[in-house]
Image (cartoon, rainbow, N blue to C red):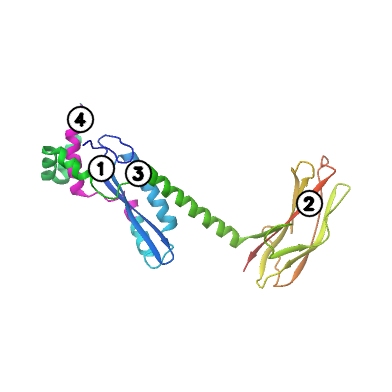
């Protein structure tokens, strides 16, 4: 049996038996697993990164074990993973024979010296019975793969996107004309476009039972023929750091007036977006 990296198939003196931990939690359920096996230095870095990423982003969301297993896993991974002494002594002892037989005597000698430093007795036994040692190491559980790393990275990216979306939606609300979010709505006549100036007057109404703060109105002007943006304006001028608040079921007036560039099209469309934060 040839000793090689279980992830990429590489054979060199950097091979080590290494295991990382990863944790995923959902409410009352937490799931932890090892990932690793015989890995070269490059694949150790990639597997460590995938396990750490998914754990850091998805490990905490379960009670009680998410808050216990996640820091434990991150601590192990940040230290470079777990490297069982006995397994690595067998690995390096058998690897030294394989490398010397492949005309890489220097690497073989280095592997044997590393094995002897870990456990000289196991190193000698592995070197004497390299095939048996390699077979024993090859049956270890928790082996990783390129596909597993891709899935962990993908899961981490998905969780990050969900968190970012939740943060954005909790900090800022928005509703354009025809939009689906009707918590805060703009009530008023269509915008006027006279002599190159856009004028919009109306009221923003809070239709909910919650206090809306940092309310501001964004007006977006586009070319009616091409849909290309021509200009945009905001009210008040301090937006997005607005001091405007709207009580539940109340409204406040907004008046916006601004001139378009001299090369603005004759036919335009005016869109409105209301931004706010919930208390």
Q: Residue at x 78, y 51 (%)?
A: 270
Which one is nearer the viewer's eye here, 233 or 165?
165
What span is in magenta?
Answer: 75-102
Give the residue at x 33% y 59%: 72
Query: Residue reaching furthest right?
Result: 195
The answer to if 84 sits in the magenta stretch is yes
Q: Name the residue under label 1.
A: 16
Label 3, label 1: how far apart the Cα atoms are: 15 Å
Helix, strand or loop for the magenta stretch, by majority: helix
Q: Is residue 131 left or right of residue 192?
A: left
**Label 4 – label 3 distance at C-alpha:** 29 Å
Q: Say which of marks 4 and 3 sits in front.
A: 3
Q: What residue did someone put label 3 on?
A: 145
Q: Nearer the viewer, residue 38 or 138?
A: 138
The numbered mark, 3 or 1, whose residue comes first in the sequence reads 1
Reading the image, the residue beneath label 4 is 106
Q: SS of the residue at dot 4?
A: helix
| Residue 91 sits above or below residue 98 on the image | below
């Amino acid at each position: 049996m040839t000793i090689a990296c279980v992830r990429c198939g590489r054979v060199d003196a950097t091979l080590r038996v290494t295991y990382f931990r990863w944790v995923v939690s959902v409410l009352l359920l937490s799931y932890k697993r090892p990932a690793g096996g015989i890995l070269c230095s490059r694949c150790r870095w990639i597997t460590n990164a995938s396990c750490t990423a998914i754990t850091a982003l998805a490990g905490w969301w379960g009670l009680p074990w998410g808050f216990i297993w996640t820091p434990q896993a991150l601590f192990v991974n940040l230290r470079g993973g777990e490297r069982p002494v006995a397994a690595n002594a067998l690995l390096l002892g058998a690897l030294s024979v394989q490398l010397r037989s492949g005309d890489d005597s220097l690497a073989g000698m280095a592997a044997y010296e590393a094995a002897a430093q870990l456990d000289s007795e196991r190193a000698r036994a592995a070197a004497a019975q390299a095939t048996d040692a390699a077979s024993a190491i090859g049956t270890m559980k928790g082996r990783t793969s390129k596909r597993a790393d891709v899935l962990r990275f993908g899961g981490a990216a998905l969780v990050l996107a969900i968190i970012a979306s939740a943060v954005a939606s909790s900090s800022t609300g928005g509703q354009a004309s025809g939009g689906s979010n009707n918590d805060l709505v703009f009530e008023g006549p269509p915008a006027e476009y006279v002599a190159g100036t856009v004028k919009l007057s109306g009221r923003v109404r809070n239709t909910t039972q919650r206090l809306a703060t940092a309310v501001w109105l964004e007006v977006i002007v586009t070319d009616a023929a091409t849909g290309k943006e021509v200009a945009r304006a905001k009210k008040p001028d301090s937006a997005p750091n607005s001091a405007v608040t709207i009580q539940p079921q109340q409204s406040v007036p907004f008046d916006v007036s601004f001139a378009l560039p001299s090369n603005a099209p004759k036919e335009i469309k005016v869109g409105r977006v209301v931004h706010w934060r919930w208390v």
